[in-house]
Amino acid sequence: MMKRTTEDIVIDVIVFIIMITVFIATVYPFYYCLVISFNEGIDASRGGIFLWPRKFTLENYKAVFSNEQLLSGFGVTIARTIIGTVLSLFFTGLFAYSLSHKNLLFKNIYITLMIIAMYFSGGLIPYFVLLKHLRLLNTFWVYIIPSLLSSFNAIIMMSFFREIPNELEESARIDGANDLTIFFRIIFPVSSPVFATVALFNGVGHWNNWFDAAFFVNNRKLKTAAFMLMELMN
Amino acid sequence: MSTNIIAVKGNKKNKKSIAKQFRLQIYLQVFALMGIAYLIVFSYIPMFGIIIAFKNYKLTSGIMGFFTSEWVGLEYFKEFFTDINFRPIVRNTVVISVLKLIFTFPLPILFAIAINEVKNQKWKRLVQTVSYLPHFISWVVVSGIIFSFLNEQNGLINQILVLLNIREKGIPFLAEPKYFWGMLVISDVWKELGWWAIIFLAAIAGVDPTLYEAAVVDGAGRMRRIWHITLPSIKGTIIIVLILSLGNLFGGGLGGSNFDQCYLLGNPVNHSVSEILQTYSLKMGLAQGRYSFATAIGLLQSVISLVLIYSSNKTASKLSGVSLF
C-alpha cells in the first residue's frame, strides 16, 4: 500500500461526511417516528422528544389495534398484496414464458404490442371510464385485475427465462409434460430469483398504493390502510 | 426451443405448416394471447379513449361513446389555454419538474461515487442498504413524516430552531407557499437518492480495474482517477438515465413523484404553487365530471413528454453517440 497523500485524506473526510449525513438523514426520521409512537400523545405534542420516549406507553398501538376501520383497512391491504402479487406473478410469468420461446409464431407482433403498451397510455380519464364500464369500480377486484400484467416485469422475466438451458424443457417434454406443467414444475423452481424480485416490486406497489382506493372505491369496507392513513393526515 | 416445434421457412406448404406449428405450440399461444387480450382491454382501449379530448363525451354513453359522441375539434384545448388557471398550473408544473431534475439527477451520481470510495466494506454496505429503504415507502407515509418534521408548533425542525435560539417562533413551513417547492425537492431527493445510486454503482462496478492500476502507475491521485476514469466510464449510463428522466420530466423525473407529492402535500393555502397539470386534470375529471376537458389536459402533458423524450434522445445520440432507441 502506498503512502496516504493529503488528497487521500481530504477525499476520505468528504466521503465520510457524505456517508454519515445520508445515514443519519435516512435513519433518524424513522427512529423519530418510532420514539413518538411509544410516547404518550399529549405529552409528545409538547415537543422536546428527540432520542427516547419521555412518557413510555403502548396506548397508541392499543388504539390502532382497537380501531376497527384501520384493522379492516389493513386486512384489505394484506389481501390485495398477497392475492394481487401471486396472480400477477403467474399471469405475467406465463406471458413472459411464452414470449421467451425463439420460435413462437407471431412473437414479434406480440412483443411490439407489449412495448407500445409500456410507453403509451390513455391517461386517467379513459382508464376510469373503462373501469366503470367493466363494472370494476367499487369492487375488491379493481385492486387486482388492472395490475395483473406488467410489461416491465414481463421484460425482466423474459430475459431471465431465455438463459435457462433448453435441455431442461426438452427432457420434460419427452417425459410427456405440457407447457403449463413445465412452467409450474420446472421454470418456476429454477427462476426463483427473478420471481422473488418481481414479487418484491409488485408487493411493495400493492402495499403502498393509495390512489385506486381513493378514486376507484367508495365502499368504506374496501378502503386500504394507505388510504386511511392519508385521510388521518388531512 | 423444444424438439417438436420446428421452424419452417420458405416452404411451399407454408400456410398449412403455420397452422400445424400453431397447433403444436397451442399452450404457449394461449398464454401469449391471454396477455395480448389483456393489453388490448387495459391499455389499447384507454389509448383509443384519448379521442374524447376532441369530442363531447358523456359518461353515460359508455365505451362505445368513445366513437359515437360528437366531434368538437380543439374546443377543450382552447378552453384550457384561456382558463385563468392555465398560466399558474403550467408554471408550477414546469418549475417543480425542472427543480427536481436539477437536484434529483446529479445527486445520486455523486452519492454513488462517494460510496465507491469507501474502503470499509461493512460500513459501505450498511449505508447503501439504509439509503435505498425510503424508496419502498409510500408517499403517504413520507408526507406523514414531513408533517411531523415541519409542523409549525411542534415539528422537529422548528423545535430545534427554537431550542438553538435561531428563531423565536416556529416557521410555518407547511402553510407558506414559498417553502413548498423546496420541500418537494428535498423529500424527493431523500426518498430516491439511494435507489438511483444503485444503477450508477452497478455501472461503476463494471469499470475495468486495470484502468485504475494504470492510472496509479502514472501517478494519478484519487480525484483525477474519479474525474478521468470513473466519470467517463459511466457516461453512457448517466446519459440513458438523463434521457429517461427528461422523458418523464412533467411526471416528476426519475421517481415520477409529482402527482403524489402535489396531491398529498397540497392544501388550500399552498394551492397557488401546488396545482399542476395532473392534479388539475384529476380534479376536473373525477371531481367535476368534465371528462373531455380533463382528457385534453392529460393529452397535452403526454404530447409534451413524447416530444421531450424524442428530442433529448436525438440530441444525446448526436452529441455523444449514446441513445435509448
Image (cartoon, helix red, strand yellow):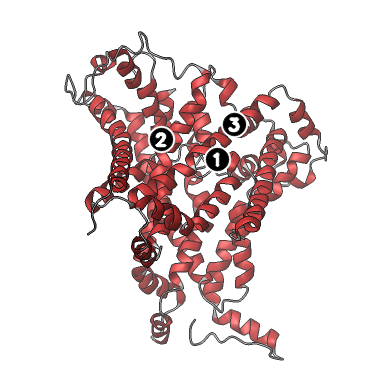
Are labels 3 and 2 assigned to the same chain? no
Query: Which three-letter amino acid code belongs to the residue tagged 3?
Result: Val
Mark 1 to mark 3: distance in Å? 35 Å
Mark 3 to mark 2: distance in Å? 29 Å
Report the residue marked by disc 3: B95
* Few, some or many residues within 10 Å of mark 2 (<14, 14–19, 20+): many
Which of the two residues, B48 or B78, is positioned nearer the viewer here? B78
Query: Which three-letter amino acid code belongs to the residue tagged 2?
Result: Ala
* Few, some or many residues within 10 Å of mark 1 (<14, 14–19, 20+): many
Which of the two residues, B300 or B158, is positioned nearer the viewer here? B158
Indicate the position of residue B256 as horizontal and vertical percent values: 52, 42
State if disc 2 and disc 3 touch (CB < 8 Å): no
* Chain to which the residue tagged by mark 2 belongs: A
Q: Residue at x 70, y 46 (%)?
A: B49
Report the residue marked by disc 2: A226
Task: Tell which circle, 2 or 1, labels the residue nearer the N-terminal end.
Answer: 1
Report the residue marked by disc 1: A137
Indicate the position of residue A135 as horizontal and vertical percent values: 58, 44
Q: Which mark is residue B1?
A: none
Indicate the position of residue B172 as horizontal and vertical percent values: 43, 15
- Nearer to us: label 2 or label 1: 2
Q: Is residue B282 visible?
A: no
Q: Is residue B243 visible?
A: yes
